[in-house]
Image (cartoon, rainbow, N blue to C red):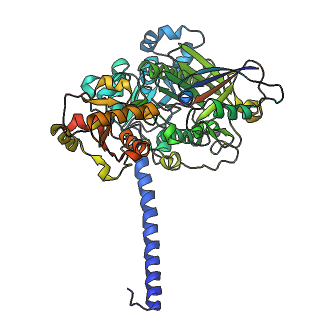
Amino acid sequence: MENWSRERLIEELKKKESENQDLQQKLEKREEDVQAILAKLIQDPTNHHIIPDKHQHPLNHREVARYSRQLILPEFGPEGQRKLSSTSVLIVGCGGLGCPAAIYLAAAGVGRLGLIDYDTVELNNLHRQILHTEGRVGVAKAVSVALSVKALNSHVELVPYEVALTSQVALIIISKYDIVLDCTDNVATRYLLNDACVLGNKPLVSGSALRYEGQLTVYHHNGGPCFRCLHPKPPPPETVTNCSDGGVLGVVPGMIGCLQALEAIKLASGLGTPLSQKLLLFDALQGTFRTVKLRGGKSDCEVCGETPTITKLIDYEQFCGAAATDKEKGVQLLEADKRVTVKEYQDVRMKETPHLLIDVRLPVELEICALTNCINIPLKQLGKPNSIAVIEEKLSSVRTKSIYCVCRRGNDSQLAVKQLESTLSEHGCQIKDIIGGLTAWANKIDPTLPVY
Amino acid sequence: MKVRLEFRGGAELLVNGVTQHTLDLDDNNNKWTVARLLTWIRDNLIQERPELFLQGESVRPGILVLINDTDWELLGELDYQLVENDNVLFISTLHGG
Ligand SMILES: [Zn+2]
């Protein structure tokens, strides 16, 4: 190309530009096609939004017998029951919040339940995701919840969606429901669901839980705020903890999920006062519920305000700088020569090469499982003077300058290497981390080591 | 002037895991606005990484501030003047499920 004349180059450029334009047009056409196909695909079996108007019909004998204990509540009564049975509720996330929410809504006699989850059941879900069973490990969560719900109440119409809630499908699915429950586990999906509910004009019953605390509120209802009114900007990703890292006591999402079902029943039947413009805080350790007063909808909110700038769904993973999942993602912070595989580290142990193994997890995690001959210094303590003193003493007693850091999955151990490289810089140590941590060790070297 | 601080929803991790703090603020000369309180907390209570508590003048995205169980947005946010026995709650929004 370097021999081409200027004219030839310009001609070539024009040709490429026109090709580019053609491709662009084809791509746009493709996207329209995809949208049309998705719209068809996601139509639920009944393909109607409003459930046949059961309002007008008296309850039949079966319904009267089944729901009698709530029918005799004066504020709820047959009218409330009829309204509930003509209401459709979409549950996004079939986990610790979605399971109790789904089962109570079904038990109460909701008309239709949509159940969204792209994930499959894992053994470590069962302590809190109580509608799944040991026999259904590996089964799609949406299907598993539908099976359990059907066993309790076969008259509820169930629509499982084995898809991830994305900007492409959210509005189409939500348009088919009256009320939406946010039972998700990550920030990106929470912003997505909020914007979709504002654009689709549906109330959003939002629950969340972590460790020993839960939170609950109803967004975009009756002049109350949406999630963006409270949080115009997403939190820094490093400040967000998920259940798999932070832990959660199963009863806590259980409590909040039940309350989400309650709020949905209130919205559907007109009972009581919905938790709009209020935030309920549950503290399991203190045994307290506390309801605080929130701001109303903000006139300058980017999505529900007077002049919204968000008028269609955006890329939420990009907006939040975090993936729309609570699954662990491996990070690569160190160059390859500062990392060893579990096989390489096994060699070090077999040959009894002098070295120091530092496990940087929390003490409670070492109680679950640990390698022999390690010392435990949690990542947060690693830079402290007494920790450095312990390491220096160990290094001289073992007569080595070789340090290996290990953690649960191989992320924190890399941070540990970086930390030690700066605090031990004068010692000329060789500091490495073990790729994949104890999880990889259990998978490849020692299957008797429990994985958590 | 006695003021009670609470940190919840994980925000307590910024203050060494301690959820409740009772302060006795000296108010001889200057009024205590929330803005002044935030700076005081950053300088006196936050152990490490102050940017995870304060960004610019205000709290970082993801933390809600409630004064006597009411959203500070309804009370003037940074300009609110603290009075005796006020309870200021910093709550980090949870996302797990
Ligand atoms: Zn809003």
Which residue is nearer to you in this view: A275 or A171?
A275
Is residue A451 visible to us here? no
Q: Residue at x 31, y 41 (%)?
A: A403
Tell me if A392 is positioned left or right of A267 in this view. Answer: left
> Relative to residue A163, is residue A13 depicted above or below?
below
* Apparent side of residue A321 relative to residue A439 in the rendered image (left or right): right
Please state the horizontal and vertical placement of residue A79, each as a whole percent of the image.
56, 17
Give the percent coordinates (x, y) of residue A176: 49, 37
Q: Tell me which image quadrant ligand 1 sits in.
A: top right
Q: Which residue is drawn at 54% across and 42% down?
A: A236
**Residue B28 falls in which quadrant of the image?**
top right
- Image position, residue A231 (x, y; %): 61, 38
- Left or right, A197 with respect to A118, comes to right
Q: In this view, does A80 lie above or below A138?
A: above
**Which quadrant does the C terminus of chain A fall into?**
top left
Q: Who is closer to the viewer here, A140 or A338? A: A338
Q: Quadrant of the N terminus of chain A?
A: bottom left
Residue A57 location in percent, x, y?
Answer: 51, 21
Q: How many marks?
A: 0
Is there any visible trace of residue A102 in the rendered image? yes
Please tell me in which quadrant of the rendered image residue B67 appears: top right
- Which of A389 and A247 lies nearest the eye of the viewer? A389
Q: Quick one: which residue is furthest to the left in this view?
A: A351
